Image: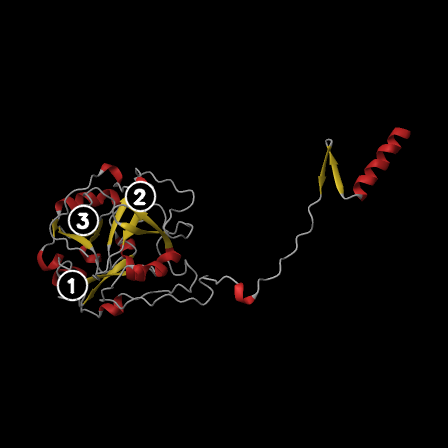
Amino acid sequence: MRRLRNVIILSLAALAAGCIVEQGQTVRDQPPLETPPPPPADTAAPSYSYDSGYQAEAPPPAGSDVGSPDVFYEQLSPYGTWTYVAPYGRVWIPAVGYGWRPYYYGRWVLTDWGWTFASDDPWGWAAYHYGRWNWAVGFGWYWIPGTVWAPAWVSWRYGGGYVSWCPLGPSGVYFGYRHPAWVAVQEQHFTRPISAVAVPTQRTSGIVSQARPLTGPHATVARTGAFGPPVASVARATGQQIRPVAAANAVRPRASVQSAPRTGMQSPVQPRARGVDGAPPGSRIGAPARPGGAVVPRSPGGYAPRAAPPGGGGP
């Protein structure tokens, strides 16, 4: 009893001292956390939050070239990640889900430039009308900024009742018939939302291999209204009377950087940390690296870079 009483007395004393006794070790309680006072007004760090009232430069109007890719950096940062890929420099990786591909979530609209891609995403005014797309292991699809505006930077194939296209890659790179970059639709559905009428990927390669590439004015980016499949043929197939509209009415920024980063996005979204000049935290970069962290891009399925096919222009 005396020993038990001594143990009780020691325990009460320990609790009174603010300690916890466990397995022979004494662990002090954490002191209460106090909120530090705010810094003086003249030393407070500036805030660059997208909700702080900061406003990036307004997107250029459709049809306008830009003097520098700098115009895209702040505008696209809420929707993906900027990083460095050799030999292209700074590129943008959209925050999209597995299986996503360019020029798929949107529709084709005839403008004074020809068939123009009208994206469902708030960043489409930039990534579908300036620059090129490429694919790399560990990155997936990434966009290489350019300064020349186009209704779309795509390569067309046409025939057999189908229209098909794929993004133009950087110089020296193009996507073979079996590459998932290719999208095909029946000509009668050409003006409808693409994701609702696109041919399944496993059937696309057969359609693409049997069609012929569009050449001449149909493959040339210029303000002639001829870019893309022949308008008269599309009108017959769709049963529509197709008249061009101004490019500015087809390509409009759908959100600003002050909006919630994912608001209005129609592409499947894969959440990803926002960053500049760095890959997303925890990402696996599967392409071989060069000194300085540069990444050598590779195409999926073992496709080696080849000479670009005829009929492609470039920014």
Which residue occupies the extreme front position in the image? 42
Q: Which mark is residue 289?
A: none
Query: In this rendering, which labeled residue sits more in front, label 1 or label 2?
Result: 2
Q: Which colour scheme is used?
A: secondary structure
Which residue is depicted at the point 53% across and 63% down? 43
In primary-sequence order, the first of circles 3 and 1 is 3
Which residue is depicted at the point 50% across and 61% down? 45
10 Å crowding of disc 3: few (<14), some (14-19), many (20+): few
Mark 2 secondary-structure assignment: loop
Q: In which quarter of the image is the C terminus?
A: bottom left
Contact, CB < 8 Å: mark 3 with mark 1? no
Amino acid tagged 2: Ala
Amino acid tagged 1: Ala
**Residue 76 percent across, percent down from the top left:** 35, 58
Amino acid tagged 3: Ser
**Residue 234 percent across, percent down from the top left:** 15, 60
In primary-sequence order, the first of circles 1 and 2 is 1
Does residue 119 appear in this view? Answer: no
Q: In which quarter of the image is the N terminus?
A: top right
Q: Residue 171 carries which label?
A: 3
On screen, residue 40 above or below 83: below
Q: How far apart are marks 1 and 2 (CA)?
A: 47 Å
Mark 3 secondary-structure assignment: loop
Which residue occupies the extreme right position in the image? 2
Q: Which mark is residue 235?
A: 1
Q: How far apart are marks 3 and 2 (CA)?
A: 18 Å
Does residue 108 appear in this view? Answer: yes
Query: In this rendering, which labeled residue sits more in front, label 3 or label 1?
Result: 3
Q: Mark 2 points at which residue?
A: 294
